[in-house]
Image: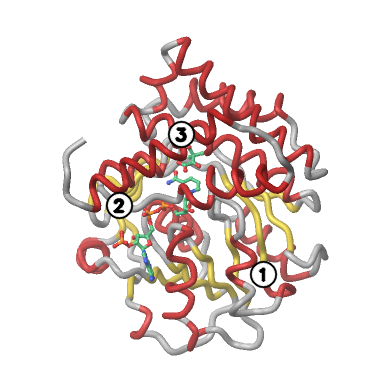
Amino acid sequence: MKIYVVGSGAMGSLFGGLLFEGNNEVTLIDVSKAHIDAINSNGLFLTTGMEGSRSIGIPAKYAHEIDEFPDLILIFTKTIYTSSALNSVKHLIGSETHIMTLQNGLGNVEIIEAFVNREKIIVGMTNYPSDLTSPGKVSSLGEGIVIAMNASGRIDAFLEKICSTFNSSKLNCKITPDVFKYIWEKVAFNAALNTITAVLKLKIGDMSSTEEGRHLVFKVAEEVIKVANRKGIPADIEGVKQNLEMAFNEHGDHMPSMLQDVMAKRNTEIDFINGAVLREAKLLDIEIPVTKTLYELIKVIEQRYEKNLSL
Ligand SMILES: NC(=O)C1=CN([C@@H]2O[C@H](COP(=O)(O)OP(=O)(O)OC[C@H]3O[C@@H](n4cnc5c(N)ncnc54)[C@H](OP(=O)(O)O)[C@@H]3O)[C@@H](O)[C@H]2O)C=CC1
Ligand SMILES: CC(C)(CO)C(=O)C(=O)O
């Protein structure tokens, strides 16, 4: 299968690298010169729990260097850049090209719909942890899953082919009609864990070693699931709590993507995570005070470093 990964940082490189090793024709597309140059000079240096460290000779390019249509565009930019990234690869979207999003947050399908119709969108979620440690170097130490579904609600042959391609590339994929239940559960997870570790500048394990840290995480998760349930989405707080416990125990050394953003003084996905939940809560007239406080704290942090001020 011919696959372009658009946004090839921590997650894009992990997925691109594994799909390439699974004998797919994969090209990484990015905007970071340092990252592209490092991969083209020395290969992608990928470390995964099962396979260890190796250098993968996968091509990395800028969008304008390519001109063939792929079967699949896997978009792995931060959600704030989805629209601009897809604009930069508009010339690569053929009539049969599908676009897949496993990005965190809410509203990803609606952004992609400006580029292809819903039948050509695969939406899902993943909880593989991945860290971009330096240009060209990515480390993913922990197991995960991919949940996927066609955004139109139909299971078709292409979706089945994608999932089996992922599975033969060591990416544990499941097709699930109830995909938005899992997306909301992941939003609850990220609204809690990503913001709290980012505000505290602590890795998952360091934060979750305190009773107060764990209490705060569960409080936010409960607020988000309350909103999902009131919208009629059967998200399950017990499942979210189990996933959080699993992250506390098994992903202790991971810096959630929002923490990686704050450390690098980049804008975060807060408007697509806590911000999106707050908008839904407002429509339903539900108070979610802890989720709102964390939203506001991340906004303060973003504004401080946008102005080059210390924290
Ligand atoms: N990291 C993780 O463990 C997990 C992350 N996710 C989600 O996956 C998504 C990706 O996260 P992550 O991999 O951590 O993010 P990264 O910031 O590591 O990677 C995103 C990459 O996209 C590049 N980029 C930005 N704009 C464009 C563009 N216009 N065209 C092409 N590339 C572009 C960035 O370059 P530059 O840095 O120069 O801007 C960067 O290299 C997010 O939605 C995140 O929430 C989900 C599960 C786990
Ligand atoms: C890996 C995981 C699940 C941890 O928070 C994540 O989604 C992220 O880092 O954004």
**Left-right relation of 127 to 242:** left
**Left-right relation of 69 to 205:** right
Please rate how many residues cluster around mark 3, counting C-alpha atoms within 10 Å: few if below 14, some from 14 to 19, many from 20: many
Pointers 3 and 2 in contact (C-beta within 8 Å): no
**Rendered view: 91 above or below 230:** below
Give amino acid for label 3.
Leu
* Secondary structure beneath label 2: loop
Task: Report the residue at 46% width, 80% height from top.
Answer: 87
- Residue at the disc numbered 3: 294
Q: Position of residue 212 (x, y in %)?
A: 46, 13
- Residue at the disc numbered 2: 266
Q: Position of residue 184 (x, y in %)?
A: 67, 43
**Left-right relation of 228 to 23:** right
Pointers 1 and 2 in contact (C-beta within 8 Å): no
- The answer to whether mark 2 is within 8 Å of ligand 1 is yes
**Rendered view: 253 above or below 186:** above
- Decide which of 23, 286 is in the foreground and name it: 286
Give amino acid for label 2.
Arg
Give amino acid for label 1.
Ile
Q: Which mark is residue 121?
A: 1
Task: Report the residue at 54% width, 72% height from top.
Answer: 73
